[in-house]
Image (tube, grey):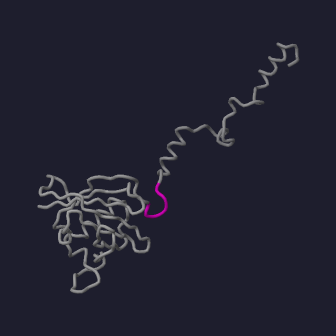
Amino acid sequence: MTILRFRIFWEDDDQTYRDIEIQGHQTFLDFHNAIVKAYEFDGKHPASFYESNDKWQYGRELNSEVLVNKKDAPALSMLKTPVSALVSLPDQKFIYVYDPTKKWTFMVELIGVSKEETHKRVYPFLLRKEGIAPAQYGVKGVNPDKIMEIEEKYDLGAEEMAEGFGSEGEEGTESTESTESMSEDTGGEF
């Protein structure tokens, strides 16, 4: 069975990519679902693959909402089209667009073909992740629960938190006890 290995680059950052292996007989809908999962998107929006050339120009479309392939239709069905049916070059390229309103765009390039599948591997298979995936909604960052754990670990107490800093090492904060002992030592003068 033929295994196709694709690299899926995020258009805005070519250092952010995912390598996915897929069996040739699996459909573009399977491929679409693997990309959505690899980039941690919710999968609630339509998507399209476009055949492309070396200059990343948009060609024939495969759409997730088209259910049947019809002759002379503007788009093919992801559900009915196996990936291997449109792979004709050793460096075949596609453009993948998720969520037409946001237009998350990814460059998809065939980077390897293998005749043997790896045992006990379920395809499509996410082989490699590089870079931080873009946040589909809002901003990705540190989990708020983790921030709370860190704050609790280094909890300074209510007094220090109110001022923002401790008083250690600041001028004018010496206790009255140490001021009195200094005046006794020097005869009441500073």
Percent of width and height locating residue 63:
30, 76
| In the image, farthest residue toward the bottom | 72
Q: Which residue is drawn at 20% across and 59% down?
A: 123
Choose between 66 and 4: the one closer to the eye. 4
Choose between 101 and 55: the one closer to the eye. 55
Choose between 53 and 166: the one closer to the eye. 53
| In the image, farthest residue toward the front | 55
139 falls in the magenta region: yes
| Above or below, 67 relative to 95 | below
Viewport quadrant of the N terminus: bottom left
- Which quadrant of the figure has residue 82? bottom left
The magenta segment is 135-140
Side of 94 relative to 158 (left or right)? left
- Which quadrant of the figure has residue 152? top right
- Which quadrant of the figure has residue 81? bottom left
Q: Which residue is drawn at 22% across and 81% down?
A: 69
| Above or below, 3 relative to 154 | below
How many numbered markers are drawn? Answer: 0
| Above or below, 161 relative to 186 | below
Percent of width and height locating residue 57:
33, 72
Q: Residue at x 76, y 26 (%)?
A: 175
Percent of width and height locating residue 26:
19, 67
137 falls in the magenta region: yes
Side of 176 relative to 103 (left or right)? right
Viewport quadrant of the C terminus: top right
Percent of width and height locating residue 16:
38, 56
Side of 34 relative to 14 (left or right)? left
Magenta segment's dominant SS is loop
Choose between 101 and 111: the one closer to the eye. 111
